[in-house]
Image (tube, rainbow, N blue to C red):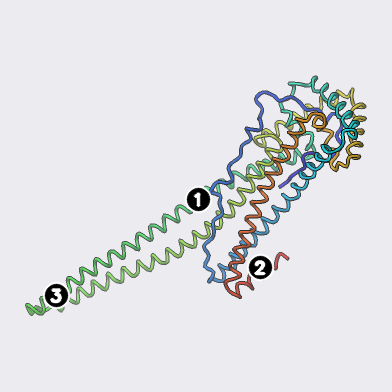
Amino acid sequence: MAFHLFGRKKNPGPEDQQPSEPQNGMVQEQDLKMPDVSDKALEIEKEKVDLRNDSARIAYLQRLYEGIQEAKRQCGDIKYEYAQVTSYLKDIQLIDQAPVEEKTELYAAAHRIVELVRERQRLQRQKYKMTDAQKRMMENYEASVSEDIQKLKEYEDYQMKIKNDLRQLGSEKNLLLADKRDIIRRQSALKTIGKVLSVILLAVGAMMLALLFLFRVDITVPFVATAAFAFAIAAIILNEARKNRIDMVITEKKCDRAVFLSNRVKIKYVNNVRTLDYMYHKYQVRNATELEFVYGQYRKAKKEWARQRESTVLLNESNQILLRELQRLGVKDRDIWFAQARALVEPKEMVEVRHELNVRRQKLREQLDYNTGVMEDCLEEIEKIRDKKPEYAEEVERILGKGR
């Protein structure tokens, strides 16, 4: 999963600083919807594992360990991106808290940049189909957009595969549950048949005894026939009951396997959905196709901007002044402000920038909390197994020791 800071650290030329007006029919932020990853269907289910079975127990511990490692890897990637976004927010705080007299040159340079860019914007307005936000993202992440387009396509293809896997696993679980109910019904029917036949045999036995003692009738042949019939029926019932027990054991194992696979696919689904949500929000698009289209529009526009360099010298001078003043204020990520000069002179724009970063940080925090929760659940389950028996604790230490 690839993440990038709000602005890539590169020194853009003046042609990279030209936001455009929104085009009719293009996507707006409120349209960027993603599947609800809080759906109960995606909640992780606890596996039913017979801890007395050595192979099943060790395999279960290994799966829990793998779940911890995957969640840890996700947390590492997210923390790195979270630190970058937080660093940018701290830079905004430094700028806001600096005394006004220390920001005179900074504001003057920013005003010049905004005016020069606005003039270029006037010449190019309504020419290319991309919103201001999308254009700004193209400027900030130009070096990685083509790579992210390919990754986004792969994530979307993977999303379809995960959905199909979830659908198939859900169908399989439903079939297995139906099989379990059918086995239980058959077993219940056998019990009922056994009880009814027992009553009938008792009645027949009582009748034959009555014939023997009251009427002195020879009941040898009927008695033998009845006993043979009872033995045959009992054998059939016991054999069917044994088959039902075997079928139930096999079905339970299949159910456990389906639960394990379903849990693994659900974790992948949630992480993939959150990654897609983050990248869609980052580029202000609805899918990879739109991102590819916007990137194509941006590349065409950039060729046009290359022929409009009358203000190159002034922009470069203003950029250098801006960079120098930001450095004097102690701003860490300075290069990204070349494309965000408007936020320095318009408070509303700065509020939007801060809100955008806070939204992204919140999304990262939610994903971090989710993966942390998965890791904690796996660790808690491992600790429960460790505490049951000393030999279990040795197995836990051996498996956990592999990652040290």
Left or right: residue 255 versus residue 184 is right
Q: Amino acid at mark 2?
A: Ile
Disc ID at residue 399: 2
Q: Amino acid at mark 3?
A: Met
Q: Position of residue 110 (x, y in %)?
A: 86, 29
Residue hosting label 1: 170
Q: Position of residue 142 (x, y in %)?
A: 79, 36
Residue at 65%, 60% in the rendered image: 66
Q: Nearer the viewer, mark 2 or mark 3?
A: 2
Indicate the quadrant containing the C terminus: top left, top right, bottom left or bottom right. Answer: bottom right
* Front-most of residues 390 and 195: 390
Residue at 9%, 78% in the rendered image: 217
Tag 1 near tag 3, CB within 8 Å: no
Answer few, some or many: residues within 10 Å of disc 3's Cα (few below 14, many 20 plus, some between 14 and 19).
Answer: some
The mark nearer the N terminus, 1 or 2, is 1
Q: Position of residue 60 (x, y in %)?
A: 58, 64
Residue hosting label 3: 208
| Quarter occupied by residue 289 | top right
Query: Image height check: is 154 above or below 212?
Result: above
Residue at 82%, 32% in the rendered image: 344
Q: Amino acid at mark 1?
A: Gly
Query: Image height check: is 357 above or below 297?
Result: below
* Front-most of residues 331 and 120: 331
